[in-house]
Amino acid sequence: MLLTSILFCLFLVIGQAQGQDFMRSTGKINVVFGVIFIIFCGIIVFLILLDRKLSKLENRINHE
Amino acid sequence: MIFKIHWWKYLGILLLVYVLFVGILNPLKPGIYDLEPNRFITNQQVNIKVKGYNTNFTKGSVISYLKTGNSFLLKASQVNIINDTDLETVFDLPPHLPGKLNLVQCSFIIDSDFDGTSVLPSKIILSQDSINEIAGNLSWTLTKSPGFHIKHTSRFPYRNILYETIRNTFFHVSLWFAMFSMLMVSVYYAIRYLKTQNRDFDLRSSSLVKTAMLFGVLGLATGSLWARNTWDTWWTNDIKLNMSALSMLIYFAYLILRSSIEDPDRRARISGAYNIFALVAVVPLIFVLPRLTDSLHPGNGGNPAFGSDDMDNVLRLVFYPAVIGFSILGFWMAQLQYRLDRLSSVLDDQEDK
């Protein structure tokens, strides 16, 4: 849920705020950067989720 | 010692760094960006302004041609070079067109001994008042191979509409390949769980599915952004898009199924069986159905992908490392997820005792 909503927000930011001129200038190279940015954000989201699960696990171990 | 166990992770990092650098920095081949005007009536002298992309018009000699669909050529009478990316070309259009049609679509060709040949397909539309096939055929030259300069370089191919986004092949397409390899390995572990009843295999299988889902969502997102700027829409009714969204839903159901069963052994058995059926359903959805109908994706709607029309050898040099690199990244992420899940299940078992 968190993941999809973050990605959806990303879309809006990249696609709408910058407009099509930005994405389609200089041979549409910014589309490639946008795609790489989305993948990067996906990996970051994965790391955040992993971090949260790890903290939960640590809490359980510490409380025993 | 650590390097010996984790060598494949370093290999993945190396491959991804290579893909990022070469995939972004290697320039495109020269091509024709646009030209105007593009609609003419025959029997007049016309002047066409051409904009090149990555071209070097000032170096080497440049000739331009018009080419009809049935291989008739018309050579430009004059080419005025303004700078490296701009030129003006003059054609003396004869009164009649080759063929029996009033309206003829022409490709525009620029041939340079420095840049090689670039084509802008079906851009120019010529119309004539009266049809005279014999005079038309005589005034244009019929030729199959007029001696164009073909340059073999290590640059990426230039395609109109795609332009630089052809580099997304390395990021968007290889994500899907990586997702699919992870799903296949997860089914392998699901089968091993069902055979051995060892719950570690189930955890491996489910963590691979979770990571593959992340890659799938990223694949949909990146594809959508790419589609927005090439097909002019976030989402089309293209069969490949709908079917991959559908297979995402199948795997979402897998995650929901897992989270809804409390007993770990029951959960492992049911989700293992579901996983096998999910892959069996997804293969026809993504790989078979799009080939049976028309699709905007290359290689679908007919013949298999990765024919020479869709994939250039220079692209392959980066694309295959990208597929391997993203797969390794996925397996690495899945491994982290698995180790975490296993630790918490060990902790669960201890608490139960």
Image: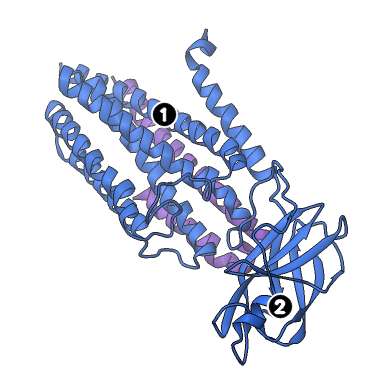
What chain does badge 2 belong to?
A: B
Q: Nearer the viewer, residue A52 or B294?
A: B294
Which chain is the one coloured purple? Answer: A
Rendered image quadrant of residue B147? bottom right
Residue beneath the point at 37% across and 29% down = B337
Give the Cα distance between marks 1 and 2: 63 Å
Can residue B245 be seen in this snapshot? no
Name the residue tied to disc 1.
Answer: B331
Amino acid type of disc 1? Phe
**Vertical placement of B22 versus B225: above or below?**
above
- Quarter of the C terminus of chain B within the rendering: top left
Q: Which circle's residue, 1 or 2, is located before the other in the chain?
A: 2
Mark 2: which secondary structure?
helix
Amino acid type of disc 2? Ser
In the rendered structure, the answer to whether residue B85 lies left or right of residue B66 reads right
Q: Are marks 1 and 2 on the same chain?
A: yes
Percent across and percent down for residue B84 are: 84, 61
